[in-house]
Image (tube, coloured by chain):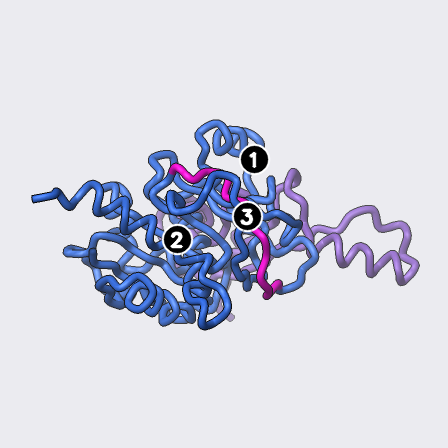
Amino acid sequence: MKFAVIVFPGSNCDADMYHAIKDGLGEEVEYVFHTETSLDGFDAVLLPGGFSHGDYLRSGAIARFAPIMPAVIQAAEAGKPVLGVCNGFQVLLEAGLLPGAMKRNIDLKFVCRTVELVVENNKTMFSSGYEQGQTIRIPVAHGEGNYECDDETLANLRANKQIVFRYNEHVNGSKGDIAGITNERGNVLGMMPHPERATETLLGNDQGLAVFTSILRNWRESHVTAS
Amino acid sequence: MYKVKVYVTLRESVLDPQGGAVKSALHAMDYQEVTDVRIGKYMELQLESTEKLEERVKEMCEKLLANTVIEDYRFEVEEVVPS
């Protein structure tokens, strides 16, 4: 399975994401610069954390118009797994691939620590490696992770089981303590916590690795036939 | 030439954490008469004369300058007379 890590000016978790795939998951991965226009040959797309285009104007607002974005949208429409973490989540929201928007954290502080998440839905291609309702510990590092949407959108997210991860504590003021959501089809996941920073026991935490093993297992089930 | 002043604010229905912090500060400074503070963005665009100027500025606001999921915008157009 071949993963693309999209690199915007200001991405700073791109190397972590690359490392998670190459060394944590043991699969093929390549950086794709934001000025590229094609994602042909890739099976999954990863949008890393950071501060794309300096977060000028709003987080993710300028990256959304990068030359690579039509290819990202095309990959999402083709049903390929698209994962946006932190700033990558913000880019997916700005691009309209996921509903809602991000505001400054409720207490206006940059929060940088490991938090508890609850796996709200383990029946997605990103979370099948977890138990339903499992509590996991994943690091967060963000100043604008306060997820906002109207009540109708929240009701839809709940009804369609699009909420995959929920904070088990009040981290940033997010509506419904939402930490990660998918699109309706379930192949685009945006999450503020950083699973790519928690992929090895050597560094103290491997509870994020299951996000990537879930993607791989799902892909193998639908693409690799036993001979 | 035209100058366009664009104002972007969080929608009334959306809680504004920055505005709330500034309101608390004003109260701490004994300006109790302040009942609400909303913080927004102000942008000035310089534009060459163009057809459908207002329509194009509206497009710029909806595509990039404001996130209409949580923000409202308004703008004022001024003709700049070269001196």
Q: Chain of mark 2?
A: A
Q: Nearer the viewer, residue A50 or A227?
A: A227
Q: Specify which label sits upstream in the sequence, 2 or 3.
A: 3
The quadrant of the picture occupied by the C terminus of chain A is: top left
* Colour chosen for chain B: purple
- Up-down: is B83 above or below B19? below
On screen, B75 above or below A35? above
> Do pointers 2 and 3 mark residues of a single chain?
yes
Residue beneath disc 1 = A150
Q: Secondary structure at mark 1?
A: loop
Residue named by callout 3: A135
Q: Nearer the viewer, mark 1 or mark 2?
A: 2
Amino acid type of the residue tagged 2 in the rendering: Ala
> Is there any visible trace of residue A128 in the rendered image?
yes
Asked if residue A23 lies left or right of residue A102, the reply is left
Q: Nearer the viewer, residue A95 or B48?
A: A95
Q: Which chain is blue?
A: A
Residue B82 located left or right of residue A185: right
Q: Which residue does the numbered mark 2 point to in the structure image?
A: A210
Mark in front: 3 vs 1 = 3
Q: Position of residue B33 (x, y in %)?
A: 89, 50
Task: Find the magenta span and give its range.
Answer: A111-123
Q: Using the image, name the chain to which the residue with label 3 belongs.
A: A
Q: Is residue A112 magenta?
A: yes
Predominant SS of the magenta segment: strand
Please tell me whether residue A157 is drawn above or below residue A144 in the rendered image. above
Whole-percent x, y for residue A41 in the image: 15, 56
Give the alpha-carbon distance from disc 3 to disc 1, as whole Å. Answer: 27 Å
Q: CA distance from mark 1 to mark 2?
A: 31 Å
Amino acid at circle 3: Thr
